[in-house]
Amino acid sequence: MLFSKEFDPGAISGLLSRTRNAGREEIVAAAATGAPTLESAARLLAPAAGYEVETLARLAHRATVVRFGKTIGVYAPLYLSNECVCTCTYCGFSMGLPIKRHTLRIDEVVREARALARRGIRNILLVSAEHPRLVNPEYVAQCVRETKRVVPYVGLEIAAADEPDYARYVAAGCDGVVLYQETYDRAIYAEHHLAGPKKRFDWRLDAPQRASRGGARHLGIGALLGLADWRFDVLSLVTHARWLERHCWRSQINVSIPRINRAEGGYVPRRPVSDRDFVHIILFLRLALPTAGIALSTRETPALRDQLVPLGITVMSAGSSTEPGGYSRPGEAGEQFELEDQRSPATVAARLRELGYEAVFKDWEHMATARPQGAGTTSAGAGTTKFGVAAN
Amino acid sequence: MAFERQYLSPCARRARETRSIPQNGNNPNHMCAVALTDPLTVGGRAFRSRLIVGTGKFSSPEVMADALAASQTEIVTVALRRVDLDAPRDPIMAFIERERYLIMPNTSGATDAAEAVRLARLARSSGLPPFIKVEVIPDPRYLMPDPVETLRACETLVADGFTVLPYIHADPVLAKKLEETGVAAVMPLAAPIGSGRGLKMEAAIAMIIEQAGVPVVVDAGLGVPSHAAAAMEMGADAVLVNTAIATAASPARMARAFALGVEAGRAAYLAGRAPELSAASASSPLTGFLAPHGG
């Protein structure tokens, strides 16, 4: 059973038009149910819900604190390569753009990972543009293996792969796979993904399921806001997340809704999403998917990120660079998009503390693979242990 | 006394018979005296407090430390996955006084027996006590423990010399099987983790308590002190609370409230409750002047 075969855009649009005129009372009732049906959840997207953001925010805040506590997970992306064979209208790595291209060697990957670990990062998301020859499964598996020697959690955000390759990455130490559909509108997807393997909408749509079958414990899915109608995309995203929750029940589902940012290509979003709508979307996602993590990227401004923290966000990137090699040798390769929040992980953690939240850098331990000898930035000497004398 | 004997549950009777309870109900130090004479014994160690506190979800390590102090707990659980063995100063461990609390690492994050065993060994080799709360949870949404893998992990860890406390469904058969492997306690869930819904599994927990030869720690889902008191009144040996304390508006005050709830519930259990009747039973019988029937 594949999501691409069951996903029915007509049904999503129908649901949106049926619930468009939902009244304020219906909206508040839907928000307060705790686990709304899809129909009920769709009411939260009705324009009238815009008048109830404060009510939705209170419910979303409470739901988040109970499930995730007063904590925010912190991670950082590590860009492996900006060499790309795809032409995508909105992306700074798009083939043909005149930027300096580079694919990190393994020793450079380790240097980057160590640079991040020195800043306190314990959760690294390896990110790459799509280049089947340079960023091949062997290379990716090796990057995962080496990064895993430095930090306990490694995620992958790379081109859609097949199940055996996902299994290979998991065996190398990959804990989670992130793959955004960008938009769930097939026609608009085709208009923005002009050439290259990323054109295959269905192959991408079914990738999270393949990753789960390959053993990925965490699945990150998302929509890139600014391409299509946001109501259609976020309701489709919720449908996708719920399908995965049912069919890939062993994997934790996380969602993200990055907004298109200015990149080298100079793309201007066709359907820009305002801050007010962005907040509405986060509240909707939290109430429609009470157990899903919600990730927030450094694409958003520090001021807005601070405001969004209590509303449903559970993880955020910090101190990010979207340039391969950007942590240890910045300025040598082109970046994917411009970042609004350039604060260091320590600064972000201090700010979260002021907001009444604890920044959680480490929330994982080597599970499927043995903890490597001498892992991390420091290690206890022979005969001693971290917390005293080992009891044998 | 005859009346009490008639209505006390087998567990309450056993407790009354085996523990020396101060009989002076007016003694202001009564609670304290009960705690001293009625310790919780797990893995050969005695504890005065019957409230175990988890360390997740707090807004800061300082808030956590204050809540731990207010709870008067003596056992705290720590998710090993949160502990940074590579950091010069781990943000959680630095705030837990080692002399004051027994740190019981848990295997949160493990989805099968092999992972739980690996985490337990890592905890021990890093110098943490050999007490381990076994959590094997393959389902990230409802966080339901896997009974088969939990049993396997416990068999290995008991053989490995750990003091093992498995987190389980309120499954009486599983509890007995685990007891046979040599676990130090069983920890059935009251309701899903973090749900705060109270003793949803009451009937099954009652069966576990009634049959248990090891301490029963009611874990997960207790939302307010009255839930904890109710579990203790049933005869649970201890409760574990995390979310309800960590996400309260004032964690330290809620921790204190849970301590009182646990103490009250335990005292009530030891006192032996009056029977629950469907009809009214006057406290001053109207026919008390009559001679006993047949007397």
Image (cartoon, rainbow, N blue to C red):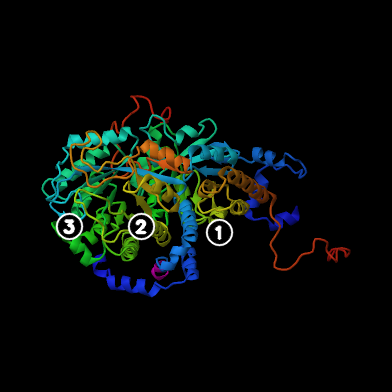
Per the image, the residue denoted by label 3 is A198
In the picture, measured across the screen, residue A152 lies left or right of residue B226, that is left
Mark 3 and mark 1, same subunit?
no
Where the N terminus of chain A falls, by quadrant? bottom left
- Of all chains, the one bearing label 2 is A
- Is residue A191 shown in magenta? no
What residue is rendered at 73% in x and 68% in y? B279
The picture quadrant where one finds residue B67 is top right
Per the image, the residue denoted by label 2 is A274
Q: Which is more toward the observer, A185 or B259?
A: A185
Where the C terminus of chain A falls, by quadrant? top left
- Is residue A197 depicted above or below B67 in this figure? below
Q: Which residues are magenta?
A: A37-42
The alpha-carbon separation of the residues under discs 2 and 3 comes to 28 Å
Q: Which mark is residue B202?
A: 1
- Is residue A236 depicted above or below A382 in this figure? below
Indicate the secondary structure of the residue bearing disc 3.
helix
The alpha-carbon separation of the residues under discs 1 and 2 comes to 49 Å
